[in-house]
Image: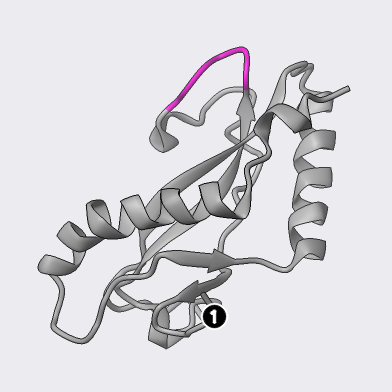
Amino acid sequence: MSNLKDHLITAEESAALAGAYTNSNYAEINRLRPAGKPDSKVYRIDLAVLQDYIDLINREMEARGIKEKGLKITLGKYPDKSTDPRLKKEYEGYQMVFFSPADMAEGSIPPKMTMGKMGEIPDLNFMDISPPKRFD
């Protein structure tokens, strides 16, 4: 049984966290970007896709004997130019996030270090980001 209740926050707490990010880190990131083209700060993914991914990594980690299963969220940036047909052209050059399986017993491992038991389990990417789209 999880301790979900210990991780839930109110809308007011969410707004305070988002505001703190907007006024500090996000402001600094955008200082270096072209005027009128702020970086992304909101990310959306279809719940069915996320659930399928959670199911996939749960099965794969179980098969590898990983007991303390988790999900890691990593910040990244799409390339300025990409030939990957899955990447929407309007997202090129924007900050993004991707999901990876995490062995909670091993602590934090940088993305380049996903070798061994976890290295063959795919990460999850290609969700909606805003800006450039508006849905926040």
Image-quadrant location for residue 127: bottom right
Q: Residue furthest front?
A: 12
Residue at which label 1 appears: 135
Per the picture, the main secondary structure of the magenta-coloured stretch is: loop
Q: Residue furthest right?
A: 1
Instruction: Left or right? Give the position of 131 relative to 30.
Output: right
Judge whether residue 105 is colored magenta: yes
Residue at x 83% of width, y 26% of height: 63
Magenta residues span 104-109
In depth, the one of 88 and 6 nearer the eye is 6
Q: Position of residue 29 (x, y in %)?
A: 20, 61
* SS state under label 1: loop
Q: Is residue 76 above or below residue 87?
A: above
In depth, the one of 62 and 1 nearer the eye is 1
Instruction: Left or right? Give the position of 8 relative to 85.
Output: right
Judge whether residue 126 is colored magenta: no
Residue at x 24% of width, y 52% of height: 25
